[in-house]
Image (cartoon, rainbow, N blue to C red):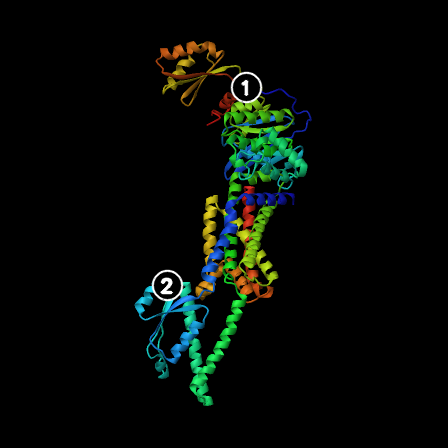
Amino acid sequence: MKIDKAVGTSGLAVLECSHLVKSFGSRKAVNDISFQIDPGECYGMLGPNGAGKTTTISIACGLLQKDSGLVKVNGKELNHKSILPKRDIGYVPQDLALYPELSASDNLRFFGRLYGLSGRELEGRINETLETVGLIDRRDDRIESFSGGMKRRANIAAGLLHKPSLLVLDEPTVGVDPQSRNAILEAVQLLSNEGMAVLYTTHYMEEAERLCDRVGIIDKGQIVAEGTRRELVEQLGSLDRIRISVSGMHREGAEVLRKLDGVQEVIEIGDEIEVLIPQARLKLPSVIEALVENHLPLTSLEVVEPNLEAVFLALTGRELRD
Amino acid sequence: MRSIHALLWVGRRRAAKDQRLAGVAILFPVVIMLLVGVLFGSNHPAPIGVILKSNDQITQRLVSVLENSNSVSLHYYTNLPQMQDDILRGRVVAGVEIPQNFMSQVDNGKNPSIDLIAPAGQAPAITARAIVTAAIAVVSSEWTAALQASKKNHIPFSKALAGAEKLTNSAETLISKKVTQSQSPFSYTAPSNLVLFVFITLLGASSAFVDTRRLGVFSRILAAPVRPISVVIGHMLGLFFLAIGQCIFLVIIGRVMLGVNFGDPIALTVLLLVLSLCAAGASTLLGTVAKSSEQAIAIGTVVGISFGMLGGCMWPTSIVGPAMAEFGHIAPQAWAMDAFVKLIYNGAGIAQILPDVLVLLGFSVLLVIISSNRLRRVISNK
């Protein structure tokens, strides 16, 4: 779980996005999104593929021009005319944005030069950054010789090199093995604990729960809910959920379950039934008994305690990985 | 400036690691220069078959002119089928048959025909045909001049003919000496392969740009405090320096190893600068158009070779006919080759090649404007 730490001590937001709007043709990819991140805060942007996460952070990093809205980094406005605030941002794109034929150190040398680093300072930062992501032993090896997870870590190193006050990571663990994924999450957690503001987009609920102080749930270009994990979960109330599959007979199953004692609500989601009930584990025997008595073929049953995935499902009617 | 330096630095590092680039930019052009130069540019005479059905004075003179030529060697045949067979097998590049009673037919005011057998469209046969035609022209002028002199000055015809032959021989010696002293057999192949491979290399280098684009490196670069115009300048300067480096290397190889005299150094420098700019513009344009690196390499190779053919990099435009030679000037390579030919063969200076350089500069400016606009749009996701 997330380590408690002081957040927002300076009073000045590292990143402030207000009323961002961006359309591609007739489709609104980002529709009036506002959020801010304080120093030392890890802000998670949670949403399924195509929800508008990458478009939002591309605008926040000055890579994409917004149709309207305002982006401020450490109080300075970022737009196509004023690019200096970019110095405070470390961007880690979803793509492996490195030269595969060059070594890790050469890649970092190049990106460091773009930020005005040179000489001993640059070489020192290269070593420190590679140490942080656990690649110091491979500093002179070509990126193309790295495993998928190592490439991702090198990708993060390039974003950290110039000691930004805001680190923006766009789904950094997609397609990564569990070991490397853990290493990446630990590194991000460490940086956040050291005071770096982090904007982290993901569609993995468990990553957002582990890393983020606050989470913005994004769907169809809008932030549909925002807050700490506790605040978001509390939106669902204190009820547990039992998710049930009865093959091909979910309508009949829902009717039976609605009549059970203690059941607050029954929701049909696709071929599944979700039952909102207090103390779900104690009620499981009566639920199973009711289904069996009515000759409903139970194929799966799961007790879901309140979490961000459940919040997302309740807010959007869709699963994160839809 | 900081970001432009960084982009130039990374371009150099990537080029140094690219073994394909070393092959295309350095090894291939040198090997092809040597091969083409040795095969077609050397002073080895082209073998020509000859059938003599006469043995009169005019026939002997014609044979003597051909034998004295440095460009052909004669192989004598007694029957036509044997000579035709050897032409087909490439033992001789062409054949000449001098008819019976050649001199008496001329004396009687007839137009006797000399049969020239040469395969169509083959460069050595075309050369042989030109040399035989020139030899006939020489002999017929001597003959005409001797007849005139004999009648006008009342001297014996044989004496007049000997005088005309002496005059022709001394003129031929002068021309032959001048040509052999100043021209290396690689004088055409060196600049033509330079032009051809500068374009092929730079068009091929666009594949690296496509890779960079697809990997998302440009997005990351623009996430730094870097303006898109700096990326455009850095990228194009990198390509320009790559082309300049290749040009300098190939000129040095041509001069030192192959003995090619590229002429006026100032004019040559200006030509190489404009040529490199043009190739950098073409490469950037292809890099912004191609959807994959494979597509960039495929298009680059086809465009580089076909425009090289049109522009006289594979053979001189003088052998393809005036219309085709004119059409070939849609390729910038043609203007570059025109300038090189003037520098190397005519001893031209900057003033003489200025029209060619200006047209090439026009191509360059057009390509640079279009490609830099496209590049800016591509990297900015606009």
Q: Nearer the viewer, residue A252 or B30?
A: B30
Q: Tell me the quarter of the picture where residue A93 sits.
A: top right
Amino acid marked by disc 2: Arg
> Does B196 appear above or below A255?
below
Residue closest to the far bottom: B154
Tell me the residue that label 1 is attached to. A233
In the rendered structure, find residue B334 and report the number of the disc placed on it: none
**Residue A1 showing in the rendered view:** yes
Q: Residues within 10 Å of mark 2 (few under 14, many from 20)?
A: some
Q: Same chain, marks 1 and 2? A: no
Q: Tell me the quarter of the picture where residue B112 sits.
A: bottom left
Image coordinates for residue A177, horizontal then vertical, percent: 50, 27
Q: Nearer the viewer, residue A222 or A87?
A: A87
**Residue B277 showing in the rendered view:** no
In the rendered structure, find residue B91 and report the number of the disc placed on it: 2
> Does B125 appear above or below A132?
below
Query: Which circle, 1 or 2, is nearer the viewer?
Result: 2
Image coordinates for residue B31, horizontal then vertical, percent: 48, 54
Amino acid marked by disc 1: Val
